[in-house]
Amino acid sequence: MPAKSVSTPPFSAALRAVGLKATVARGRVLEVLHAALQPASHGEIEARLAAAASPLDRVTLYRVLDSLVTAGLALKAVDARGVFRFSAAQTGVAHQRHAHFRCEDCGGVFCLDAPPPAAPSLPDGFRLHGAELDLHGTCARCGDAGGGHPA
Amino acid sequence: MPAKSVSTPPFSAALRAVGLKATVARGRVLEVLHAALQPASHGEIEARLAAAASPLDRVTLYRVLDSLVTAGLALKAVDARGVFRFSAAQTGVAHQRHAHFRCEDCGGVFCLDAPPPAAPSLPDGFRLHGAELDLHGTCARCGDAGGGHPA
DNA sequence: CGAATAAACGCAACACAGTTGCATTCCATG
DNA sequence: CATGGAATGCAACTGTGTTGCGTTTATTCG
């Protein structure tokens, strides 16, 4: 095997494929996003980077995430508390017309593959882009333990 | 007519009906919410209060809005930019298991009386508190005009 | 109608998420 | 290996939302 393991950041091919420079910061952020089970907030990503290796500058992380979203490698959404959450863009997954479960305690969002809800008829002039069934309550972890917020 | 027009804030009956003190601040905020055509952000409400009469303290407005939401007189939602938007709750509408249409352009939320979606089976330990069908796209006004954000 | 009391108000300060400007460092090209 | 432009890191700043605390006000009760 070639001895270029040190100088090649992960996901460099994917980055170059969308026209981005393959930097270590972007590679590490993509690693975190792909390892995450749920969409992660800026703070959570920052904490995981700091725990895994050397911390990444707050501002740099914002800019990295922005570049990944712009390039289509990551998705950006707003959770119920008004905080942006980022996730790796799965190639080929139509992220439309499915169901979310949102835990009112920890703020976590879980994707359920539920049958697409039937869209009701809309008033005149309204144009539909997507539909999600938004379920909310308490998740298993918060219901079991007195448990709290993830970060 | 009785001469108590000065000492009686608007919406005092509605406030007392839900167990809230009928204060001038709450009455004025409810007036603004009912006059608004779209869900308004904290800043917009603050500006309208300042323009209409004497300004209301920032913190007081946050607490007034919170009390109205808790009492069920107002609705709180997050727009695409992560900012909370408030709207007057229509009386008599059971605010559970119905559908919202959220305009991705102006951030407005419209309530539709749609059939309650069937809740899918949840993983073990998950407890359901409510379910809403969240439709999104562009509303009639934003689709017509090139119209943009309210503020 | 007037006093008591608990909630609501206003102010100050704080906390958190996100942004901007600029000097330095690093990836990609030749 | 040199070079140029993008990416990084640091500092400072804005905007949104929150907490603590003393004062004011709406309601209740005498």
Image (cartoon, coloured by chain):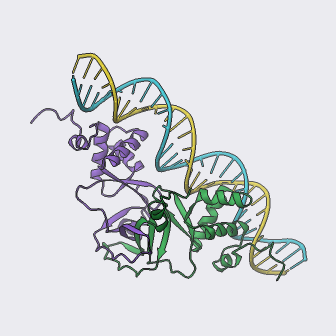
Chain colours: A purple, B green, C cyan, D yellow
Residue at figure coordinates x 48%, y 74% from the top left? B111
Depth check, front residue: A68 or B70: A68
Query: Residue B117's quadrant in the figure?
Result: bottom left
The extreme front residue here reads B145
Q: Quadrant of the C terminus of chain B?
A: bottom right
Q: In screen coordinates, is A97 left or right of B115?
A: left
Residue at figure coordinates x 42%, y 61% from the top left? A107
Q: Is residue A139 above or below residue A61?
A: below
Measuring from the top left, give residue C19's x and y in whole percent: 48, 43
Depth check, front residue: A56 or B139: B139
Query: Residue A10's quadrant in the figure?
Result: top left
Q: Is residue A51 above or below residue A103?
A: above
Query: Residue A90's quadrant in the figure?
Result: bottom left
Depth check, front residue: B140 or A89: B140
Can residue A10 be seen in the rendering of this structure?
A: no
Q: In screen coordinates, is A128 left or right of B146?
A: left
Measuring from the top left, give residue B146's x and y in whole percent: 47, 58
Measuring from the top left, give residue B133's x and y in whole percent: 40, 73
Q: Quadrant of the N terminus of chain B?
A: bottom right
Depth check, front residue: C4 or B82: B82
Q: Is residue B53 above or below residue B88?
A: above
